[in-house]
Image (cartoon, grey):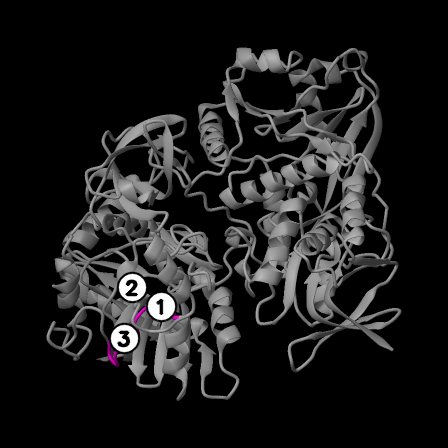
Amino acid sequence: MSERVKIVIIGGGIAGVSALYHLAEMGCTDVLLLERDELTEGSTWHAAGNVPTYSGSWSIMKVQKYTAELYTKLAKDPDFPINYHVTGSVRLAHSEERMAEFKHVTSMARANGMQYDVLTPAELQKVYPFVETHDLVGALWDPLDGDIDPSQVTQALARAARAKGANIRRHERVTGLQQKPNHEWIVTTDKTTIECEMVLNAAGYRAGEVMALLGRHLPIMTMAHQYLVTEEIPELAALANPLPLLRDPDTSYYLRQERHSYILGPYEWQSTAMWLDGIPDNFAGKLWPAELERLEPQILDAGERVPLIAEAGIARVVNGPIPYAPDGNPYMGPERGLRNFFHCNTFSFGIAQGGGAGKAIAEWMLNGRPEFDIWGIDRRRFKEYATTQYTIDRALEVYQNEYAMGFPFEERPAGRPSYMSPLYDKLKAKGAAFGARGGWERPTYFDPKGEVTDHTLSFFRKNGWRKVVAEECHAARNTVALLDLPGFTKIEVSGPGAFAFLDNIICTKLPKVGRLSLSYALLPDGKLLSELTIARLADDKFYLVGAASSEWHDLDVLEMAMPQDGSVTIKNVTKDYGSLILVGPKAREVLSKVTTTSLENADFPWLSHKIIETSVGTVLALRVNYVGELGWELHAANDQMISLYDQIWSAGEQHGIRDMGIYAVDSLRLDKCYRGWKGDLEIGFSPFDASLDRFVDMNKEFVGKAALVEEKKNGSPYRFVPMTLDVDGDADVPFCAGIFKGDKRIGIATSGGWSFTLNKSVALGYVFPEFEPAGTKLEVEIFGKRVAVTVGAEPLFDPKNDRLRS
């Protein structure tokens, strides 16, 4: 006999129980959590229990901030006391680069209401008197950091959820999952059958096993992570108050007082992937034997940094499993292509993130979206290329670099290449450097003469490739440049209902046949969901182009809204076609030697498309680009790409044609104030916030219109503006830098970089509407320094788009 509930949660660690708690808090108590063993017996029970709020990611910082606030609230319950110690923490800086990172994260924290501070070595010594500071530049102080008992906090959440009417059953294994035609679910366990509307996979390191029940792969692996607990140390026993938690990111460990002892937790270079042949059926509450030799460098370094620990004996070692995704971040949100199936799993830092993750997934399941954008931990960020071996290689690299600085323009090598253009080998031989975007290898810059010898990473404006990228930008602006840009999301939407379908989910007026437009899909609350270039191939056929990383996201946006009457067909053609981008004042002269199709303005105007004839066959040409020049995107079949490239190159040699990479594109797009999806555009902002008013057709009906009508009436909270630095300085504006007018924080920067065209540092961002007018004087915080900027008029370069129309 089966039973029925609204939601089934699989997994009783901190993530699953937090989701249960937050669903109940939101009034949804018809929820059943199933745990195959006891609560917390996966990775939760043996976690060290640190609760940092620090993160270089805006969204993860928000998740962790909420977690700390939740634990503070729970710890105040007199009927269920929890061991939660808010001691604060110090992070040590050995270099000015690390201090720059700390200053930026401090600014981010303050924007989120957390009073981080940056300390000198002398100030650090006062906070942590046992630390050696002779080789340090400074430190970061996080007053909200601390530690909590993982099992206690999980049980507290479970107790509160049960009190509201939610249910938990232990020692019940999920053995089968089946989706019904109405998109509800049948969950089979070793004891019964349960029907439900939604399923949440919160199975921790067993989350991949849950997906295997559906015949699906989840990119997850398990790492052996160790920490040791020392014997008691008299000096610690004599302290009136516990020491702050200490982290030394440059040597990769944390050191925490635990009663009268220390916990030392390294992220060692000799990390170990476990269970490559499968997870044992019974590992609940178990650990592996200690392997202290792997930790020797960190143990020795900690003894030199804090001499108190040098002579202390080791009381015990905890060596337990923690799950890792390829980037070390958890999986949240919908499973690609499955209605009513969600993820909240694979937490490498589950105690620090569990509270906020539970809140976010409960909001997603009940309201259709989390409070703030968490694309960086969305399950759909990894596609088919994330194989088991890829996941292992990338996760090991992440673990080894767990405390590494988050430099811009760092292209780590593990797991690459995955997806490659047919031109990959040819371009590599021509001196291309590559970076992976959405799994696709894209040229970052070209160094045909071997001039780039300094590959030092930095937060400051001293990258070794700047000269060659400047030359690529010059070619795009003054002669002609060619870019191989594989991996664009490419989707065909067709059928008698195609127009009505797209017209409803897109807020932009759909183009006429032969034309194309930049278009936006919104959430019901009017916030930005997707950005797509839409080319109308026929009355009932459209070609949609999106970011490489958005493929699974945008397919879900379309498929979940598709009518079920057969009037619309959606076909993913992402891998069927490559893309060559030809741009520059000489682009027409070059392309005219490759095609017999007329490229004159009268025949092929800006924002139109044509099937052009070439000697390699027909090619879809879109007269649009992301750099703001005369140019075309050429979408060709994979077997045409090499020959098409060769013909364009041959035709362009007399004009000094140059290969171009995506670093140049990012500089050029700043000149034109072109937004980036999930950088400048995300679900925290509406199209009016983003100053995209011209892309919203308020004369038709579309998803999110009612919210925009209200926003029009009441005014938008933000406007999107370009800014230029008044004095160049030595660094560009980092992502999420604060924007100020006097002492008042009035906005946030979402893009920053050097314009090789304007010879200026440019930033894009959101400000309160009163600061939108061009000429407004503001300040942006760049690595701890307030820098004067001037708001500009959009676009900063070629304001009438004469070059695009030429």
- Expressed as whole percent of the image width and height from the top left, the position of residue 15 reads 70, 50
Q: Which residues are magenta?
A: 506-515
User: Whole-percent x and y of residue 648?
Assistant: 23, 67
Residue 16: x and y in percent read: 73, 54
User: Going by the image, does 38 lie left or right of 626?
Assistant: right
Label 2 neighbour load within 10 Å: few <14, some 14-19, many 20+: some
Between the residue at mark 2 and the residue at mark 3, the CA separation in whole angstroms equals 12 Å
The span from disc 1 to disc 3 (Cα, nearest Å) is 12 Å
Cα–Cα span, label 1 and label 2: 7 Å
Residue at left offset 19%, top offset 76%: 595
Between 779 and 209, the one nearer to me in the picture? 779
Residue 511's label in the rendered image is: 3
Which residue is tagged 2? 695
Label 1 sits on residue = 507
Q: Work out which residue is located at the far front of the displayed protein and give it.
A: 713
In contact (CB < 8 Å): disc 2 and disc 3: no
Quarter that holds the C terminus: bottom left
> Which amino acid does the dot numbered 2 rest on?
Phe
